[in-house]
Image (cartoon, rainbow, N blue to C red):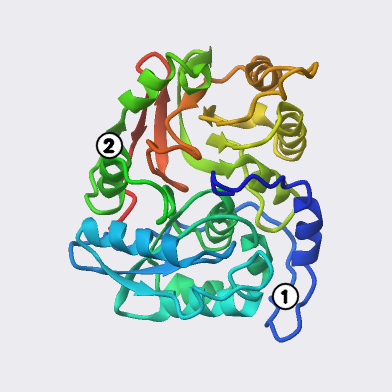
């Protein structure tokens, strides 16, 4: 969920089960047995100055202030803005019903004038769309899709079902930061055969007073694999479903916000049981803001909790990399081959993410 959202996500397991049920008035995709993805990557066309970007809310509801902030941000980067028809809808905590959010998503992918889709926030609710998405429509009209947190559900489903490269990056309504914009545009608008991502200097400085912003190497080494991951609670919630992340051979990236260490331990244990971390090529944990124990309680620290899962591994593993619910973050293209170098503290994309 977005960093401004303080709610717990204990109910995600229930949502996973609910997503498998047909909803009234919503077309339901036929169930198929889970299988390892073998299809070719689909890379969307790059974004160019002047392109139209649709602002959508596929999960949690938004408000006028956030919409204005998101539109101004996109225009400041040289793009035009189109608002989703149901962007302002409210259905409980969600940005409209499942059908309304699906309609906006499908329209944005089908509209030839829209070249990219930038989610205004995460929140919750994207998981309910997965069984009803028209994946063949999206396969025919691949586009840049940007967001993080709850948007993890869309990233993993689109990669699993059709091999679409999407972008774990800032939500449209989050605060403006030069590092974040440079990293995003380098990946979605300026394709290079290789691109080296260094860590945010602002985060390094912040680590002097907030240690969890610091980089920590748990297992040294160099690892190469396809980038797979996202928000920990969502990656864990999708385990055992047709949209689950296959971590074997992958460079796994995980982040979380506003959760106590015991919850991170539970989600990482569940994920490790479903798709063992030992089979991954490498592990990257982002900056997990406000994820320490409650003051005065007897509990493991964030680092102690992460080390339960990372120290036994025989693959490179790091924490504190510049992604997550933070102002200065780099963008991760899902499914693209990359190299993690723990000594250099870099992540290198080994292929362009867009055409």
- The residue that label 1 is drawn on is 30
Q: Which of marks 1 and 2 is in front?
A: 2
Residue 49, by quadrant, is bottom left
- The residue that label 2 is drawn on is 195
The percent coordinates of residue 272 (x first, y second) are 72, 33
Separation of residues labelled 1 and 2 (CA atoms): 39 Å
Q: Which residue is drawn at 41% across and 80% down?
A: 110
Q: Can residue 345 be seen in this view?
A: no
The percent coordinates of residue 236 (x first, y second) are 70, 44
The percent coordinates of residue 139 (x first, y second) are 46, 70
- Tell me if 353 is positioned left or right of 217 in this view: left
> In the rendered view, would you say 295 is above or below 268?
above
Q: Quadrant of the C terminus?
A: bottom left
Q: Residue at x 51, y 29 (%)?
A: 287
Q: Which residue is drawn at 75% across and 70% down?
A: 31
Label 2, residues with CA under 10 Å away: few <14, some 14-19, many ≥20: some
Q: What element carries label 1?
A: loop
Label 1, residues with CA under 10 Å away: few <14, some 14-19, many ≥20: few
Q: Can residue 176 be seen in this view?
A: yes
> In the rendered view, would you say 316 is above or below 155?
above
The percent coordinates of residue 209 (x first, y second) are 46, 15
Q: Who is closer to the viewer here, 202 or 251?
A: 202
Residue 123, by quadrant, is bottom right
* Between discs 1 and 2, the one toward the N terminus: 1
């Amino acid at each position: 969920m977005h960093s401004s959202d303080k709610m717990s996500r204990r109910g995600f397991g229930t949502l996973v089960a609910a997503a498998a049920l047909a909803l009234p008035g919503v077309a339901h995709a036929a169930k198929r047995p889970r299988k390892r993805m073998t299809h070719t990557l689909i890379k969307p066309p790059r974004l160019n100055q002047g392109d139209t970007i649709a602002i959508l809310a596929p999960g949690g509801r938004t408000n006028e202030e956030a919409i204005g902030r998101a539109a101004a941000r996109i225009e400041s980067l040289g793009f035009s803005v189109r608002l989703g028809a149901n962007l302002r809808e409210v259905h409980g905590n969600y940005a409209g019903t499942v059908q309304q959010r699906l309609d906006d998503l499908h329209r944005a992918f089908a509209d030839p004038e829209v070249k990219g889709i930038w989610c205004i926030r995460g929140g919750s609710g994207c998981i309910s769309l997965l069984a009803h998405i028209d994946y063949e429509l999206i396969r025919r009209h691949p586009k840049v899709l940007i967001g993080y947190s709850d948007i993890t559900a869309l990233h993993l489903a689109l990669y699993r079902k059709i091999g679409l490269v999407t972008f774990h990056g800032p939500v449209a309504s989050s605060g403006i930061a030069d590092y974040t914009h440079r990293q995003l545009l380098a990946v979605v608008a300026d394709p290079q055969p290789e691109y080296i991502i260094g860590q945010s200097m602002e985060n390094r400085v912040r680590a002097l007073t907030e240690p969890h912003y610091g980089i920590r190497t748990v297992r040294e080494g160099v690892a190469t694999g396809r980038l797979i991951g996202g928000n920990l609670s969502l990656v864990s919630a999708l385990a055992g479903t047709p949209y689950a992340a296959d971590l074997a051979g992958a460079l796994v990236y995980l982040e979380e916000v506003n959760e106590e260490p015991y919850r991170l331990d539970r989600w990482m244990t569940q994920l490790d049981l479903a798709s063992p971390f030992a089979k991954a090529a490498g592990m990257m944990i982002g900056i997990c803001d406000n994820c320490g124990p409650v003051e005065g309680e007897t509990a493991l620290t964030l680092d102690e909790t992460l080390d339960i899962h990372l120290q036994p591994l025989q693959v490179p593993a790091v924490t504190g990399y510049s992604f997550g619910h933070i102002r200065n973050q780099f963008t991760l293209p899902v499914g693209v081959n990359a190299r993690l170098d723990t000594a250099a503290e870099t992540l290198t994309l080994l292929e362009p993410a867009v055409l």
